[in-house]
Image (tube, helix red, strand yellow):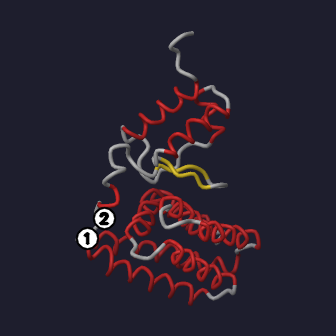
Amino acid sequence: MPGRLHRSDEVYNHMLVRIAEGEWKEGDKIPSESQLCKAYSVSRISVRSALQRLQGQGLITTVPGIGSFVSAHPQEISIRPHMGSSISSAAFLEFFEFRQAIEFKAIELFVIHGSDRDLQSMQDLVARMMECSDSDRAGFSALDYAFHMNILHGCRNSYLIGAMEPYADQYRHYLTEIVRLSPKPVPDLAVEHAELYRLLAEKKPTAAKEFLLSDNAYYHVTVFDAHR
């Protein structure tokens, strides 16, 4: 019919509205291609076309093998690099204390229960981090979140995993803000994750925890204290 939108345009418009109205917020993982195909009753070609348009506008970032994440609000693209932190110094410190209680124990258990497959997944994530440019901080953040969730799930303790689940969104946001505001280039952040992977692979939990403790202390002082 003349004037009728292509299905890919309909999908694009609907997804754009969900981002613009805040239903899908910055850092949120959007449904997979198969889920979107089912939700909109369209082909994978239509979904991929819509995703490519959103990605081309800088609204989403797609990480191969992981998924697509909202990287900006339509009206914030031009001012986003100049925004301050949405996390206060006190909130950062409080959440890191919570992270210590969960992730530090997970590190201890990971070196005991983590499988070769877990280590391979982490190595693959580090390899993808190494490919990220400094302009792709949203993509790096998605890999960062997957990396730390891999540690948690690799510890094989359902109680620790369950304790973090209600705070998964906050944890993702916390990591996203670190990467977004970090004065370090993304390649340097990738090298740091490679070092953390090495310590876990060599079964050095104490050194791994000290590494994370030092890293978070650095961000507390240089980034979040600076944005009070």
Depth check: give the residue in front, 160 or 147.
147
Residue at far left of view: 228
Residue at far top of view: 1
Can you tell which mark lies on residue 94? none
Q: Would residue 85 be found to the left or right of residue 17 on screen?
A: left
Element at label 2:
loop
Classed neighbour count for the residue bearing mark 2: other residues with Cα under 10 Å, few (<14), some (14–19), many (≥20): some
Q: Is residue 136 above or below residue 215?
A: above
Q: Residue at x 33, y 44 (%)?
A: 75
Q: Would residue 164 be found to the left or right of residue 155 on screen?
A: left
Q: Is residue 223 above or below residue 204?
A: above
Q: Residue at x 30, y 64 (%)?
A: 85
How far separated are the C-alphas under marks 1 and 2? 6 Å
Residue 132 percent across, percent down from the top left: 57, 65
Residue of label 1: 227
Residue 214 percent across, percent down from the top left: 44, 86
| Three-letter amino acid code at the position of disc 2 | Ser
Depth check: give the residue in front, 48 or 145.
48
Quadrant location of the N terminus in the rendered image: top right
**Comes first in the chain, label 1 or label 2:** 2
Q: Residue at x 57, y 29 (%)?
A: 8
Classed neighbour count for the residue bearing mark 1: other residues with Cα under 10 Å, few (<14), some (14–19), many (≥20): some
| Three-letter amino acid code at the position of disc 1 | His
Depth check: give the residue in front, 91 or 182.
182
- Asked where in the image residue 7 lies, by quadrant, the reply is top right
Q: Is residue 193 above or below residue 159?
A: below
Element at label 1:
helix
Q: Residue at x 67, y 34 (%)?
A: 44
Residue 104 percent across, percent down from the top left: 52, 79
Residue contact at pointers 1 and 2, CB within 8 angstroms: yes
Can you tell which mark lies on residue 85? 2
Residue 36 percent across, percent down from the top left: 60, 35
